[in-house]
Amino acid sequence: MHAKFSPSLMCMDLTQFREQILAMNNKADFYHVDIMDGNYVRNITLSPFFIENLKKITTVPIDVHLMVNHPEDIIPLCLNAGADIISFHPETANNKIFRLLNLIKDAGRKCGVVLNPATPAESISEYAHLLDKVTVMSVDPGYAGQKFIPQSLRKIKKLISMRENNNYHYLTEIDGSCNEKTFARIATSGVDVYIVGTSGLFSLHSDIGLAWDRMLDIFRNQTDH
């Protein structure tokens, strides 16, 4: 499977929202939208309102990452706004994971979970058959620009082998510090989707189309893909 790329839109230039999205529409495999509540992580970023506006100018699947303490309050808002994939952190939903995954699936959308650096791959075993995507954090959640945590690559390999051994269908995805310094190492894990933010994409050129081409060149040079 060829590598897929999902730009993290909290890192984009919001003064050029429309131009940047239109430039990436025929390039991106997904759009990654972080929604933070200021409690689960000490940061507040995008919102269901942002999803609603994004939906007006794209058909690229909108992939929402909830970093919130009460995902049950935000999931319905994201579904109404038009999110295509919704993922949350299992720690925030231990007593309602099945209910939330089924809520998303019953709405005809895709569901996933996000594993923090200290959360083991095996923790999803009871509900892995329901998942469309498993995101592995390679930095602690909440802030851009952190140092890459290499142990995350072992977790991705484990998730891929769990998928193959059990015929699960989820995509694996890596979130955090995907850039020129880490592409080669990350590629050895076999991960399906790379989330690219400031260092991996948006800082490479002010013209986002040129930044994307540069990112792909760097990726190919680093990984021989």
Image (cartoon, rainbow, N blue to C red):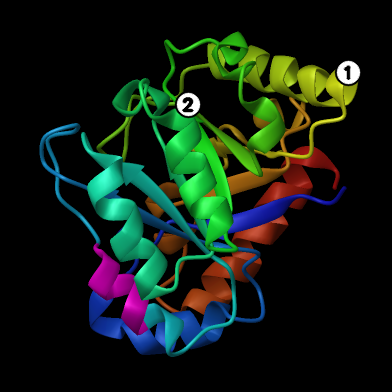
- The residue that appears at 58% across and 19% down in the rendered structure is 124
Which image quadrant for residue 97?
Answer: top left
> According to the image, label 2 marks what residue?
138
Which image quadrant for residue 109?
Answer: bottom right
- Name the spot of residue 188 as percent of width and height, x first: 77, 25
Closer-to-camera residue (101/193): 101
**Quick check: 179 above or below 12?**
above
**Which badge, 2 or 1, comes first in the chain's sequence?**
2
Which image quadrant for residue 165?
Answer: top right
- The residue that appears at 41% across and 65% down in the rendered structure is 79
Three-letter code for the amino acid on which mark 1 is drawn: Asn
> According to the image, label 1 marks what residue?
165
Could you tell me if residue 25 is visible in this image?
yes
- Name the spot of residue 113 as percent of width and height, x first: 50, 34
- The residue that appears at 61% across and 45% down in the rendered structure is 194
**Quick check: 19 above or below 212?**
below
Image mark count: 2
**Quick check: 23 above or below 210?**
below
- The residue that appears at 53% across and 10% down in the rendered structure is 120
Q: CA distance from mark 2 to mark 1?
A: 24 Å
Could you tell me if residue 176 is visible in this image?
no
Three-letter code for the amino acid on which mark 2 is drawn: Ser
Query: Is residue 57 in the magenta section?
Result: no
Closer-to-camera residue (37/153): 37
Q: Name the side, left or right, on which 215 lies relative to 20.
A: right
Closer-to-camera residue (217/86): 86
**Which residues are drawn in magenta?**
47-53
Front of the two marks 2 and 1 = 1
Q: Main secondary structure of the magenta part?
A: helix
What's the mark number on residue 131? none
